[in-house]
C-alpha cells in the first residue's frame, strides 16, 4: 500500500479549502426571490437555481475527497475515525439530496404541469423533503465532526481549533433542530458559515504539521 506524503496532505487541504470557499461564494448567490420577481436585496445577485445547487453538489463531492485524506491522517483504523467518516459521508449524501430537491425537482414539477393546485401541493411536499434532508444532513455532519474531535485534537493549534469547532457545531446543530428545525435561507447561510469555519480549520491541519502525529 502506498504511504501518503505531506504533499498529499497539502493537496487535500487545498481541496478542502477551495471547495469550502466555493460553497460560501455560491451561497451568496443563492436565489432568494420568486421567479420573475426581481432582486429582493438579500445576499448578492441571484444566480440560476439549478446552477447554484448543482455546483453545491460538486462542492460536496470535492469535500468528500479532501476529507477522506483527513481520515487517513488521524488514523483510519480508529473507531471514532471510522464513525466520523461514515457520519460525514451520510450527511453529505443527505445535503446533496436536499440540493437535488431544491435545484432540480422543484423546477421539474413546475415544468410538468400548469395546474396551480399541483404546484402548491407539490411545493409543500418538496419543501418538507428539503427541510428534512437538510436537518438530517446538518446533524450527521456535525456529529461526524465531533467524533473526529478527540483524534484531531493532537494536531497542533489548528487541530485544537478544529476539535473545538467540531464539538461546538454538533451542539449548535442539536440545539437548532430541537428548538426549531427549520432551515430557511438565513439559517442555511449561518449553518454553512459555521461549517466553513470547521472545514477551513481542518484544511489548516492538513496544510501544516507532519503526517502521523495523531496516530
Image (spheres, grey):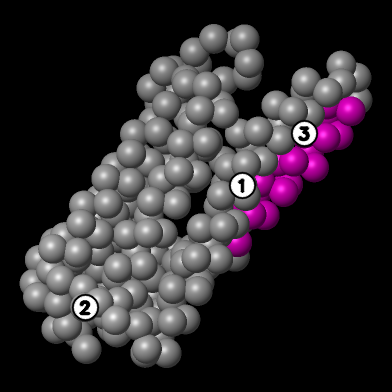
SS majority, magenta: helix
Q: Earlier in the sequence, mark 2 or mark 3?
A: 2
Total numbered badges shown on the rendered structure? 3
Left-right relation of 105 to 59:
right
Left-right relation of 105 to 30:
right
Q: Point out the stretch of residues depicted in magenta.
A: 118-136
Secondary structure under tag 2 reads: loop
Identified at 13% across, 63% down, the residue is: 7
Identified at 20% across, 57% down, the residue is: 11
The 10 Å Cα crowd at callout 3, few under 14, some 14 to 19, many 20 or more, is some
Looking at the image, which residue sits at the far left? 209
Quarter holding the N terminus is bottom left
The reply to whether callout 2 and callout 3 are in contact (CB within 8 Å) is no
The 10 Å Cα crowd at callout 1, few under 14, some 14 to 19, many 20 or more, is many
Tell me where residue 9 appears, x and y as whole percent.
19, 65
**What is the spatial separation of the Cα atoms under label 1 and label 2, in whole angstroms?**
36 Å
Left-right relation of 31 to 195:
right
Camera-near label (1 vs 2) is 2
Q: Earlier in the sequence, mark 3 or mark 1?
A: 1
Residue identifier under label 3: 123
Identified at 30% across, 76% down, the residue is: 72
The reply to whether callout 3 and callout 1 are in contact (CB within 8 Å) is no
Residue identifier under label 2: 3
Looking at the image, which residue sits at the far front? 1
Q: Is residue 84 above or below residue 198?
A: below
Camera-near label (2 vs 3) is 2
Tell me where residue 186 appears, x and y as whole percent.
48, 39
**What is the spatial separation of the Cα atoms under label 3 and label 1, in whole angstroms?**
13 Å
Residue identifier under label 1: 98
Residue 32 appears in the rendering? no
Q: Nearer the viewer, residue 8 or 79?
A: 8
Tell me where residue 6 appears, x and y as whole percent.
12, 69
Amino acid at each position: 500500500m502506498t504511504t501518503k506524503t505531506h504533499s498529499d496532505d497539502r493537496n487535500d487541504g487545498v481541496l478542502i479549502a477551495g471547495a469550502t470557499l466555493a460553497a460560501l461564494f455560491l451561497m451568496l448567490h443563492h436565489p432568494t426571490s420568486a421567479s420573475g420577481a426581481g432582486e429582493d436585496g438579500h445576499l448578492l445577485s441571484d444566480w440560476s437555481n439549478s446552477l447554484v445547487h448543482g455546483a453545491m453538489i460538486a462542492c460536496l463531492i470535492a469535500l468528500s475527497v479532501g476529507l477522506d485524506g483527513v481520515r487517513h491522517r488521524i488514523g483510519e483504523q480508529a473507531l471514532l475515525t471510522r464513525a466520523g467518516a461514515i457520519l460525514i459521508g451520510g450527511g453529505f449524501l443527505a445535503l446533496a439530496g436536499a440540493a437535488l430537491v431544491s435545484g432540480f425537482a422543484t423546477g421539474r414539477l413546475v415544468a410538468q404541469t400548469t395546474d396551480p393546485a399541483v404546484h402548491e401541493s407539490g411545493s409543500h411536499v418538496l419543501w418538507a423533503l428539503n427541510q428534512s434532508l437538510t436537518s438530517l444532513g446538518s446533524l450527521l455532519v456535525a456529529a461526524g465532526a465531533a467524533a473526529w474531535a478527540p483524534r484531531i485534537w493532537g494536531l497542533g493549534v489548528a487541530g485544537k481549533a478544529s476539535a473545538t469547532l467540531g464539538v461546538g457545531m454538533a451542539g449548535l446543530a442539536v440545539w437548532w433542530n430541537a428548538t426549531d428545525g427549520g432551515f430557511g435561507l438565513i439559517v442555511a447561510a449561518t449553518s454553512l458559515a459555521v461549517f466553513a469555519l470547521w472545514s477551513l480549520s481542518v484544511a489548516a491541519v492538513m496544510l501544516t504539521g507532519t503526517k502521523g502525529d495523531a496516530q
